[in-house]
Every structure is written in C-alpha cells, then in structure tokens.
Amino acid sequence: MKQLALGLVVEVTLGLETSVSGGNAELVHALQRIALRDAGPRAVFLWGAPGSGRSHWLSACAVDALMAGRDVIRFNPAADPFAGPALHPDAVLLADDAHLLDDAAQVRLFVRWNEAKENDAAIVVTGDAPPATLAVRADLATRLGWGLVYQVQTLSDDEKAEALIRHAHARGLRMGDDVASYLMSHGRRDLPSLIAALDALDRSSLEQHRPLTVPLLREVLQAPPVSRS
C-alpha cells in the first residue's frame, strides 16, 4: 500500500505485531487472540481519552483478522441490524466510539452484540470511558462490560516517535529520527495529529518529488491546512 498518482495518499494501518504497544501489551495480546480466533474471551472493550489510540488498536485488530482469513464486519450505526452481514464463529464485529451513538444506534449495537454472542462471533468495541460510566443505555453498557475491558495507555513521546517512523515505513517512506524528533517538538503530540501531519508530509513529498526531510517538514507545518473532503 503506497502512494497513488496525482498526489493521492493511501492510508496505511499497522497490524498488532508491527504497532508500538507501549503499556498496552496485555491489550494487544487479547486482540491477537481475537484476530486469530484462539480460545478465550470473545468480547473486548477498549476505552481511553481522545488521542489515546483506541481507534488505532481497533483497526490494527481488523488488519490481523483479515490476514488470518477472518470475516471483519464494521458496525454500521445507521443500518438495520437484522439486515446486516450475518455474524458467525469466524466473524469479528468492530464498533468504534460507542459513546457517540444516538439512542437508535445504541439499540442496533445492542442487537448486534447479542447476535455476536449467540453465534460465537468475536466483538471489539471502543469508547471514551469504561462500560460502567459510558454514556449509553444501561442494557448496552452491561453487555459491553461482559467481556475483557482495557484502558488504552497513551504512548510516551519516544514511543510516539517510533510509531510515527513505523507508519512512515509502512507507506514506503524513509523517515529519519531527526524528522520524527522535529515533528514531536514542533507539532501537536497526540498520535492522530501526528499521523495527520504525516499524511500532509507524505502528500508534499510525493507532489514535490522530495524526500522526507526537516526542511520539507517545516514547510508543511507552516502551510495552511488543506481540506480533505
């Protein structure tokens, strides 16, 4: 998965093994068991503050599950749960940001969660708080707390720099420690913002046929934001 022509950039998601785990080793192990369908819990709930990486770990689990031949199904908040893709023992249902779901979508997730349990499918859900205090219906919160629950630990600055380099390498880009250090020192240091800066850096490198260097990064950071509609 590398750059396309005309300045377009392909989003690259690291798998569980290639991601920087930091203090999330136990969480990663649980998701690996889900992805590989090892014996064990079939439901995992991940929670953490914005920018902690909970959505990344959900996507990394999807990468590993797909590579293992699993049927990965993203929860659609707007879809009739009874009309959605069938859940079965080799399926993994993923639902991000449960706390943002409206009442109708919460009911749909409740139905899908029950379907997953009845059909021995795996399910991974994320939110901004543990199930007991999550801003959702009480019956859904109860379901979300039935499996393993992990708080996502935010990476240290050194770990974020390493994660940034790994994301760049996954795109086929050569990023040196100097570029990663400069970005950590001069930009927002939450991982989503760092990845967004890498997107812009990747695009500029491609358009200008220039390698990833500190001078190019300075230009990118000083440029006005570009709409990505």
Image (tube, rainbow, N blue to C red):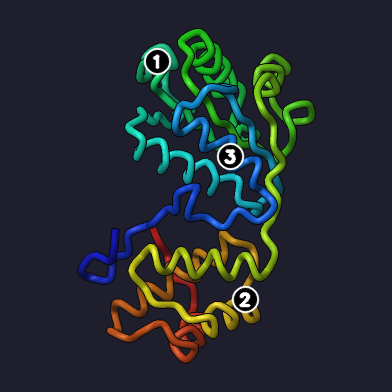
Q: Which mark is residue 29?
A: 3
User: Which residue occupies 55% across, 12% down?
Assistant: 114
Q: Amino acid at mark 3?
A: His
Q: Say above or below: 102 vs 177.
A: above
- Closer to the eye: label 1 or 2: 1
Q: Which mark is residue 132?
A: none
Residue at mark 2: 184
Q: Secondary structure at mark 1?
A: loop
Measured Cα–Cα span from mark 3 to mark 2: 28 Å
Q: Amino acid at mark 2?
A: Met
Measured Cα–Cα span from mark 1 to mark 2: 43 Å
Q: Looking at the image, is mark 3 or mark 2 earlier in the sequence?
A: 3
Residue at the extreme top of the image, as rendered:
118
Q: Position of residue 190 (x, y in %)?
A: 64, 63
Say which of 155 and 110 sits in front.
Answer: 155
Residue at mark 1: 88
